[in-house]
Image (cartoon, rainbow, N blue to C red):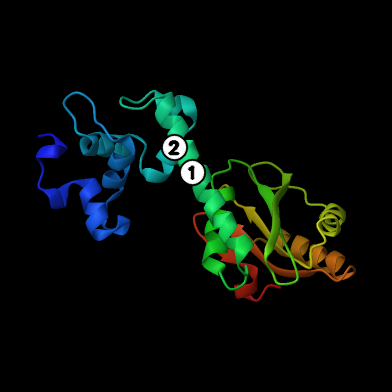
């Protein structure tokens, strides 16, 4: 039965408009994005198949172009649309950080950093450079490494912080394993960075480790 023959309250688009996006399942949200199904399958049916085939929404969203386009009902146009949606989401979160105080919007900070770093297959060390009011000046991915580590150079971080005239910084790096527990090496480099930046009166406000969840050094009492 086509979706247009469903009761109004069960159609994904109408359900979203009436109840809000949070009321929809992953398949219903994906169906709105897809807009149409394929022969013999509604958009919702196709969405269920795709979520099963990709083992969930996250794997679908992070799929590369080749993997994405080989599935029925998908193609380059849909891939381009999806990448545009994901990039708009990242920019939306970044604009929120720029307008507000990164310390008073910790959830937005977590969501932004997770969106930027979570899905890398290698370790990436990044820095949020902040002004005196702790608003974001710029986000930069500064060092890249392997699946289990990245070399971080305090001198380069200090140089970049001075270049941006930053008053404070927030560090972030990902653990490709998905386990966000800080390691002893993470603690040591954080202290080295903190010591180096203190010489030029730049504060380290936090260090986030991004995996399946996001762990804050400040909340753990590690700063």
Horizontal placement of 193 versus 34: left or right?
A: right
- For mark 2, what is the residue? 82
Spot the residue most to the right: 199
Task: Work out which quarter of the rendered image holds the N terminus and state it.
Answer: top left
Residue at the image point whose x is 54% and y is 56% from the top: 93
Q: How far across and how far down the image is residue 177, in percent? A: 55, 48
Residue 86 badge? 1
- How crowded pointer 2 is (Cα within 10 Å; few <14, some 14-19, many 20+) is rated as some
> Where 90 sits versus 111, above or below?
above
**Count of numbered circles on the image:** 2
Residue 99 badge? none
Give the image quarter of residue 147.
Answer: top right
Q: How far across and how far down the image is residue 34, in percent? A: 32, 35
CA–CA distance between discs 1 and 2? 6 Å
Residue at the image point whose x is 74% and y is 66% from the top: 131
Label 2 secondary element = helix
Residue at the image point whose x is 21% and y is 36% from the top: 45
Does residue 181 appear in this view? Answer: no
Which of 3 and 126 lies nearest the eye of the viewer? 3
> Where 174 sits versus 221, above or below?
above
Residue at the image point whose x is 31% and y is 48% from the top: 26
Horizontal placement of 70 versus 151: left or right?
A: left
């Amino acid at each position: 039965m086509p979706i247009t023959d469903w009761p109004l309250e069960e159609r994904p688009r109408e359900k979203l408009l009436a109840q809000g996006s949070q009321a929809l399942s992953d398949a219903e949200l994906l169906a709105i994005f897809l807009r149409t199904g394929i022969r013999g399958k509604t958009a919702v049916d196709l969405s269920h198949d795709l979520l099963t085939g990709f083992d969930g929404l996250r794997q679908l969203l992070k799929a590369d172009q080749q993997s994405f386009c080989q599935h029925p009902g998908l193609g380059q146009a849909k891939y381009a649309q999806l990448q545009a949606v994901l990039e708009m989401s990242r920019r939306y979160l970044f604009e929120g950080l720029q307008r507000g105080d990164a310390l008073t919007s910790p959830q937005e900070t977590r969501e932004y950093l997770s969106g930027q770093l979570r899905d890398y297959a290698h370790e990436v060390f990044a820095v949020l450079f902040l002004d005196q009011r702790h608003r974001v000046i710029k986000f930069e991915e500064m060092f890249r490494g392997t699946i289990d580590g990245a070399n971080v150079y305090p001198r380069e971080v200090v140089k970049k912080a001075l270049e941006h005239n930053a008053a404070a910084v927030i560090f972030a790096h990902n653990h490709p394993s998905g386990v966000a527990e800080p390691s002893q090496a993470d603690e040591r480099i954080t202290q080295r960075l903190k010591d180096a930046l203190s010489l030029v009166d730049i504060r380290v406000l936090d260090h986030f480790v991004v995996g399946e969840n996001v762990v804050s050094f400040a909340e753990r009492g590690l700063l």
